Image (tube, rainbow, N blue to C red):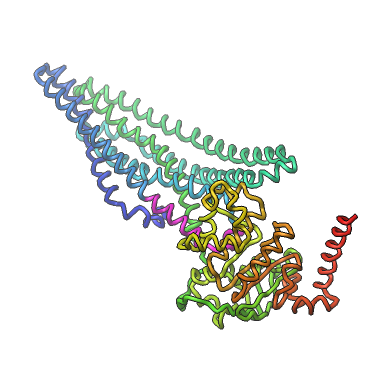
Amino acid sequence: MLVFKKLKSFYLPYKRDFIWSMLFLLVVAAITVVYPIILQMTIDEVVLGKKYDWVPWISFGFIAIMAVKGLSTYIQHYLADMFGIKSVYLLRNALYEKLQRLSFRYYDNAKTGDLMSRLTADVEGFRIFVSFGFIEILRFVIQVGASLCVMLYYSVSLTFVTLVVLPFICVTAYKFDKAVHPAFRGIRESFGQLNTKVQENISGIHTVKALSKEAVEIERFNETNQVYRTKQLTTAAVWAKYFPLMELIGNISVVALLGYGGFQVIQGVLNPGELVAFYSLVWYIMWPIMNLGFTINMFSQAKASGERLLEVLEAPETIYDGKDVKPIDHLEGHVVFQDVTFHYQMEETAALQHITFDASPGSTIGLIGATGSGKTSIIQLLSRFYEPTEGTILIDGRPIQEYELKMLRTQIGVVLQETFLFSSTIKANIAYGRPDATMEEIIDAGKRAQAHDFIMELPNGYDTMLGERGMGLSGGQKQRIAIARAICTNPTILILDDSTSAVDMETEFQIQQALQEVMKGRTTFIIAHRISSLKHADEILVLEDGNIIERGTHEQLTSDNGAYQRIYTLQYQDQAAIIEKAVR
């Protein structure tokens, strides 16, 4: 029950719905126990006692009771559903908000499909138990308790003979719960893996088809699906083992009832109507006990789901606003890295080692180096997507931890190498970081990013609806919209992470010319593989294995016989070869 105790903040606010549902459940349970009493009166008084004048009254009373029970059942189910639906509404919102607050470090190890499974299947599993499981447990207690009281009223000895098997059913139910919970936990985890496999395949379908790997992906899916099937079969085996056993024990109780009860009727200790009523009451006890397996089933699924949901809700938030955060409206853009070292995982080699540089306001810093050299790590630390392992990062003389996260990131415009666009209009995508931007400002951002012309050629211009991840646009078009989005926020610090990698050299030149205007007065960090993008930088940092191995202007670095000069020579030779081939 610890899981439900930890999640109580999501369902306790709606306890009124639950309490009213429970009250109507009491009415339903009371009426249910009245049935055998009416049956006993009909047999003993009307049939055997020949009190036929009771028939209209008993019939009228029975119809009235049925109407009350039907109405009470409807209200009880409605309120129970409301209790569950409202509870998981809060829970689902809390999960989504938590995912927004978790740092990149959490997502480095998380799988998209598994997270989707938690927000859908696991939340739904928890809802079903909250809506019906709690009520079923109360129904069990109330109905069994009321039936037992009536049975004791009719015959104490027959009650004890009938219920002598009850401890055996309880022990079996306990063992069933112990066996089925880990089985359901395995099913939930396997379902998350299955979702992950489907999500990865759909996201990478172009790569799969381009390399003709459909058969390989089908085989991999079959393997994951096989694990999921095995987990389900294991759970089915547990169910098949314990539920028939509980039913067998219940039927033994019925045999004992008919044998000893029939003997009491022959001896005149018990009336025939009382025996018939007793038989009905026994099933009002036995069926809830045997259906306890279904309730345990529901409870185990909800418990397993709750554990997986708590893993998200209780995940540590490593990036957050500290107590000493001071609100500020604007940054000057003076960025300083002081002896910064960073590990993605502590046991791994450092992604950055003792990085130190000083970027004055309005300056442009170029970052170049091989893949994995640490370029992207620097800008991720600057935006506080991660915290440095050692060292300090200052903006305008203050550690970045002293700035409010929201304010800090709105002052930093980022254009990532891997462009992401939302399934919305182009206008909404450009204004995503600044929803209050006017249409004139959106168009101006589009023009500066050299995106306005191709946008106006689309059927609906800036109101054109994009497909998932910007489907329908070329890589270069998507990158130019991403640049327009960064420009629209009017940031103090601008980060361009290889932002022109997906455009041709002519478009790159046009964008670079436009960015020269945009970069004025802004501290800009440019990550690029093409030296042509870095020529005008105030300082270029050449990185290798997380270290700055060279630094200086383009002219200084090309005059040295170092790594930058070798990169420049290779790129120049490649361009010269292309030109020579074109001339021929």
The residue that appears at 74% across and 60% down in the rendered structure is 505
Location of residue 424 in the rendering, given as x and y in whole percent from the top left corner: 52, 51
Rendered view: 15 above or below 276: below
Range shown magenta: 87-108
Q: Is residue 456 magenta?
A: no
Q: Position of residue 338 (x, y in %)?
A: 64, 81
Q: Nearer the viewer, residue 464 or 185?
A: 464
Is residue 408 in sight in this rendering?
yes
Q: Residue 507: image x %, image y %?
A: 70, 59
Instruction: Give the main secondary structure, helix, strand or loop, of the magenta stretch.
Output: helix
Q: Classify the position of the C terminus by image quarter.
A: bottom right
User: Which image quadrant is residue 223 in?
Assistant: top right
Q: Nearer the viewer, residue 300 or 21?
A: 21
Which of these two is toward me, 308 or 271?
A: 308
Q: Residue furthest left?
A: 53
Do we see residue 304 in this rendering? Answer: no
Is residue 9 rendered to the left or right of residue 217?
A: left
Q: Quick one: which residue is furthest to the right in this view? A: 584
Which of these two is toward me, 288 or 233? 233
Q: Answer with left or right where residue 79 lies relative to residue 93.
A: left
Residue 386 against residue 53 in the figure, above or below? below
Q: Residue at x 55, y 79 (%)?
A: 332
Give the image location of residue 62, x and y in percent: 18, 26
Identify the residue at horizontal 24%, vertical 37% (top origin): 72
Measured along the vertical axis of the image, is residue 544 above or below residue 152? below
Left or right of 91 in this view: 234: right
Tell me: residue 463, above or below residue 24.
below
Is 96 covered by the magenta stretch?
yes
As drawn, is 286 to the left or to the right of 442? left
Q: How many marks?
A: 0
At x 11% / y 24%, what residue is drawn?
57
